[in-house]
Image: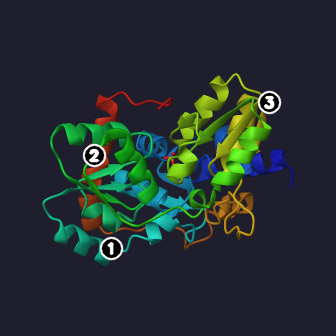
């Protein structure tokens, strides 16, 4: 089937089922195009959360990973939220077990609990704040100015970046993203040396030694904006390679290079591609209304509890005017 045929079929299905697609920048290029061309949305994790709650459609199709679907459900409990693949998870989410995390929080109950959006609804339900990469620094700066001591989970690299930037007093959970953790420092330095006329764009889920080589560090949206604004011929990108579709679309004359994930003698587990984001393929968009096993289901109790820290995140964001360029 051609792209045009897929587009016609998916438009009809969306209309019939009163549905809209919300996709993340990391998913397959064709899925991102179909989201855009059917009047849906492609964005970073915060924008996806905001966008979903403003739609009139009764069904939201989330092309991304499970925590994104759960956030959409928490913010829209009366809508049906379908994932393209319910098995699409995130190593940060699976690396932060609810019972273990609760025990950690109980042991340090003098601290406020800040969790990254890449966590389960249950983990969010025992947290004070949810953050995404686009607002982590301003929020933690704000909480630090109030004299708060914090727990940060689950991403230790993003946590360290936030501490380096803000000087916050945070206890870190030992989690990581299997994609960003793979970037290799020596090989990245070699790549930069080979292309001196370059900008280096890094997502803050990367290790400190990679972040230190960056011209821009930020959320997926921020990195796309930086790639547009860059005057350099070469742009080295240290984040999931699905984002390259958007970057190349806006800057067809620039040369985009994937930051190296395979060092000498090292084994590459992810190679810059998230295995779970990769489950979001076009065929699943065609099957999504028949799949039956891909609906996000959460108890009212979890929804009510997890909604509070998510609402705080969204309200903080609005008040601080963090926008698409942040
Ligand atoms: P963004 O919030 O920057 O889109 O990041 C989401 C994510 O899951 C990164 O791994």
The residue positioned 71% from the left and 35% from the top of the image is 235
Image-quadrant location for residue 287: bottom right
- The picture places residue 237, in percent across and down from the top left corner, at 67, 43
Location of residue 167 by image quarter: top left
Q: Could you tell me residue 100's position as x and y percent?
A: 31, 76
The residue pinned by badge 1 equals: 98
Q: Residue tagged by mark 2?
A: 168
Q: Quadrant of the image for the N terminus? A: bottom right
Tell me if I can see residue 30 in this picture: yes
Marks 1,2: beta carbons within 8 A: no
Nearest to the observer: residue 23 or residue 229: 229
Task: Quadrant for residue 4, please give it.
Answer: top right
Q: 10 Å neighbourhood of mark 3: few (<14), some, or many (≥20)?
A: few
Q: Residue lying at the far bottom in this picture: please name it.
A: 99
Which one is nearer the viewer's eye here, 236 or 132? 236
Q: Residues within 10 Å of mark 2 (few under 14, many from 20)?
A: many
Secondary structure of residue under mark 1? helix
Mark 3 and mark 1: Cα distance apart in space: 44 Å
Q: Which mark is residue 252?
A: 3
For residue 209, side relative to residue 171 (left or right): right
In percent of the image, x 38 and y 44: which residue is there? 164
Mark 2 and mark 3 lie on one chain; the one further toward the N terminus is: 2
The spot of residue 223 in percent (x, y) is 58, 37
Q: Earlier in the sequence, mark 1 or mark 2?
A: 1
């Amino acid at each position: 089937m051609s792209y045009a045929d897929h587009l016609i079929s998916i438009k009809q299905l969306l209309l019939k089922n009163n549905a809209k697609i919300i996709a993340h920048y990391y998913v397959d290029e064709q899925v991102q195009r179909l989201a855009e061309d059917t009047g849906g949305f492609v964005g970073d994790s915060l924008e996806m959360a905001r966008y979903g709650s403003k739609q009139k459609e009764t069904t939201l199709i989330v092309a991304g990973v499970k925590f994104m679907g759960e956030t959409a459900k928490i913010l829209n409990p009366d809508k049906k939220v379908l994932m393209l693949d319910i098995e699409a998870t995130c190593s940060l989410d699976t690396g932060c077990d609810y019972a273990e995390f609760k025990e950690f929080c109980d042991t340090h109950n003098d601290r406020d609990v800040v969790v990254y959006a890449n966590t389960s609804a249950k983990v969010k339900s025992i947290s004070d704040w949810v953050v995404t990469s686009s607002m982590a620094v301003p929020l933690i700066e704000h909480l630090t100015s109030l004299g708060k001591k914090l727990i940060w989970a689950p991403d230790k690299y993003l946590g360290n970046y936030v501490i380096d930037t803000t000087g916050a007093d945070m206890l870190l959970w030992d989690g990581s993203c299997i994609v960003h953790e793979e970037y290799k420092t020596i090989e990245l330095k070699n790549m930069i040396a080979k292309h001196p006329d370059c900008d280096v764009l890094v997502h803050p889920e990367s290790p400190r030694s990679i972040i230190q080589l960056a011209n821009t560090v930020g959320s997926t949206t921020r990195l796309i904006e930086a790639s547009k604004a860059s005057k350099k011929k070469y742009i080295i990108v240290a984040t999931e390679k699905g984002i390259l579709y958007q970057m190349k679309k806006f800057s067809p004359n620039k040369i985009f290079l994937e930051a190296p994930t395979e060092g000498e003698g090292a084994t590459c587990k992810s190679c810059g591609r998230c295995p779970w984001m990769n489950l979001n393929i076009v065929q699943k968009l065609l099957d999504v209304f028949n799949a039956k096993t891909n609906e996000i289901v959460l108890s009212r109790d979890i929804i009510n509890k997890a909604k509070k820290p998510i609402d705080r995140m969204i309200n903080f964001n609005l008040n601080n005017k963090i926008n698409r360029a942040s």
